[in-house]
Amino acid sequence: MARFLAGAAAMLLLMTAGFFVWQGLAQQEPSPIPPAPEATADPLLPMAEPEPRRRPATPPAADSRTREQRRFGRADKNDDGRITLAELYEPRRRAFAKLDKNGDGRLSFEEWAVRTSTKFGEADRNRDGALTPAEYATTAPRRRAQPRCACPQPAEGAAAED
């Protein structure tokens, strides 16, 4: 029985020691703050003051239409308040015509495979038969440029407001 009590006491002592070691590791002092870098500019020269930012007189008007209304407006080509099937087909016709090489109005596997093989060949710069991540990145579809904001732009070097 004495060995059992000695084992239990030893186990409690080891668990207590482990707990204090664990707490000591969790409460390490943070590393000291590094000293500020020394100024490289000549301290005798006055510093240039930044230019004040100019704000526009009136902010641009926001579009009051919802996202779905704007999406509907893009699809409604003739602005009659209705979308016909022809209006939905039109933006996709040119993309389909590029793939439909024989012009029969059907896209066969061979027509698709020719385009895919050509695109793969153009992307495989080192001609090893496999695309690296950098080569594969060149196959991403080109995004259309977003229309630029008509807002006046801040002067170069001006700090952003928070």
Image (cartoon, grey):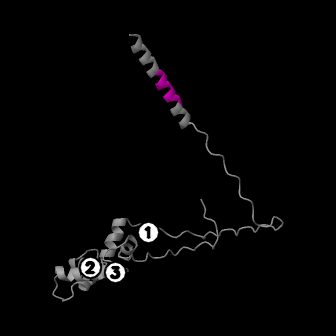
- The residue that appears at 82% across and 68% down in the rendered structure is 45
Amino acid residing under circle 3: Arg
Q: How busy is the neighbourhood of tag 3: few (under 14 within 10 Å), some, or many (20 plus)?
A: few
Q: Residue 97's image quarter?
A: bottom left
| Above or below for 80 versus 46 | below
In space, the residues marked 3 and 2 are separated at their CA atoms by: 16 Å
Residue stretch rendered in magenta on the structure: 12-20
Locate the C terminus and report the quarter of the image it occupies. bottom right
Q: Which residue is mark 2?
A: 116
On the rendered structure, is 157 left or right of 90? right
Q: Nearer the viewer, residue 59 or 71?
A: 71
Q: Which mark is residue 63?
A: 1
Q: Is residue 37 magenta?
A: no
Secondary structure under badge 1?
loop
Amino acid residing under circle 1: Asp
Q: How busy is the neighbourhood of tag 2: few (under 14 within 10 Å), some, or many (20 plus)?
A: few
Q: Does residue 47 appear anywhere in the picture?
A: yes
Q: Residues at badges 3 and 1 in contact (C-beta under 8 Å)?
A: no
